[in-house]
Image (tube, rainbow, N blue to C red):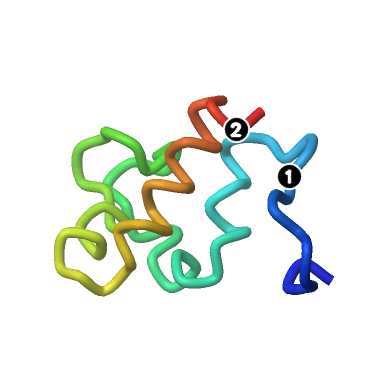
Amino acid sequence: MADSAGIRALAAWNIPPEELASCFVEFRPYLGECLYSNCLHVDEEGCAIRQAVDDDVINNRRYTSYVRIVSGEER
């Protein structure tokens, strides 16, 4: 279990960047709502997930974690 004592890191191996957002449960209501269908939710115009972060609906720390993973900083 990921919530077990002693776990300090959990890696998501072999998840394509375009599928990573679906691993973040709080992102799921916004998937498919972006202006562009190939949105990676990082710096694209019309991103519904980034708007939800700006509106304080999605926690900024969770979004920052997503960006680090999708950009390859956590790989």
Q: Kindly indicate whether the residue at mark 2 contacts the one at mark 1 (C-beta within 8 angstroms).
A: yes
User: Quick one: quadrant of the N terminus?
Assistant: bottom right
Q: Which amino acid, by three-letter code, is at mark 1?
A: Ala
Residue 11 in the image, given as x and y percentages of width and height? 74, 44
Most distant residue in the right direction? 1
Circle 2 Cα neighbour tier, 10 Å, few/some/many (<14 / 14–19 / ≥20): some
**Lower sequence index among marks 1 and 2:** 1
Residue 6 in the image, given as x and y percentages of width and height? 78, 63
- Marks 1 and 2 sit apart, C-alpha to C-alpha, by 9 Å
Q: Is residue 70 above or below residue 6?
A: above
Residue to which mark 2 is pinned: 74
Asked if residue 15 lies left or right of residue 58, the reply is right
Q: Nearer the viewer, residue 37 or 7?
A: 7
Residue to which mark 1 is pinned: 12
Q: Is residue 64 above or below residue 70?
A: below
Q: Is residue 75 above or below residue 45?
A: above
Q: Nearer the viewer, residue 72 or 17?
A: 72
Circle 1 Cα neighbour tier, 10 Å, few/some/many (<14 / 14–19 / ≥20): few
Q: Which amino acid, by three-letter code, is at mark 2?
A: Glu
Q: Secondary structure at mark 1?
A: loop
Q: Secondary structure at mark 2?
A: loop
> Closer to the camera: disc 1 or disc 2?
2
Which residue sits at x=32%, y=52%? 34
Which residue sits at x=60%, y=32%? 74
- The image quarter containing residue 24 is bottom right
Residue 38 in the image, given as x and y percentages of width and height? 45, 37
Badge number at residue 52 = none
